[in-house]
Image (cartoon, grey):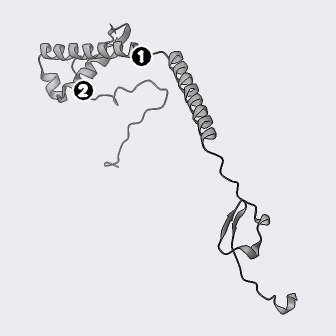
Amino acid sequence: MAGARQYKTQTPGAPVNSELSDGPVIAGTGSDGVIEIAGREVALDDVVQGAFETSGMSLDEWNAADGEKRDELIAAQRRDMESMFRSSQDLPGQDAAREAAVAAVNARKAARAQAQASSDSAVPAAPALPHSSEIDPASLAAPKLCRDGWLVPTTQRQLPRNFQ
């Protein structure tokens, strides 16, 4: 078969097949360099990739740009990452956040209990609904709500002959 399709596959766990990953390369990537930004180790490729993505340039424009322009964009990306890492270090730790959440829940419980206590003392309790067995059906003129449902007045009917 001359026109048969051929598919490239990769077995899970097998080494990377270089034929499958021959995509376009971003200029500045491909090194194993690691830099430290605000106390964290970051791969240089990640910084370059981030600079490329935020630059708004196409791949061809990025690769054709002179080294100084790319270096400026990469330095700006590094500064952005540094400020982001510094601001994330200012956030409270997980234990502090958990303690704050527990304190907020306890404060809400206390406020709810206080509101419940003040509403109980200010407003008398509503009278409980009567049970349907406590109401005389002959005295009903309209439907009445009871604890076990609605009680509806009905007219007396004569039983059928076979029930008499």
Residue at which label 1 appears: 91
Q: What element carries label 2?
A: helix
Is residue 120 toward the left or the right of residue 32 in the image?
A: right
Up the image or down, 149 lies above or below 63; here it is below
Measuring 26% from the left and 14% from the top, which residue is drawn there? 78
Measuring 56% from the left and 27% from the top, which residue is drawn there? 105
Measuring 38% from the left and 37% from the top, which residue is drawn there? 8
**Residue 17 image-quadrant placement:** top left
Residue at which label 2 appears: 53
Name which residue type carries label 2.
Glu
Residue 7 spot, x, y in % from top left: 38, 41
Residue 112 spot, x, y in % from top left: 58, 34
Is residue 95 toward the left or the right of residue 20 in the image?
A: right
Label 2: few (<14), some (14–19) or many (≥20) C-alpha neighbours in 10 Å:
some
Up the image or down, 18 lies above or below 87; here it is below
Up the image or down, 51 lies above or below 124; here it is above
Numbered mark located on residue 49 in the image: none
The C terminus - image quarter: bottom right
Report the mark closest to the observer, 1 or 2.
1
Is residue 55 toward the left or the right of residue 159 in the image?
A: left
**Residue 85 image-quadrant placement:** top left
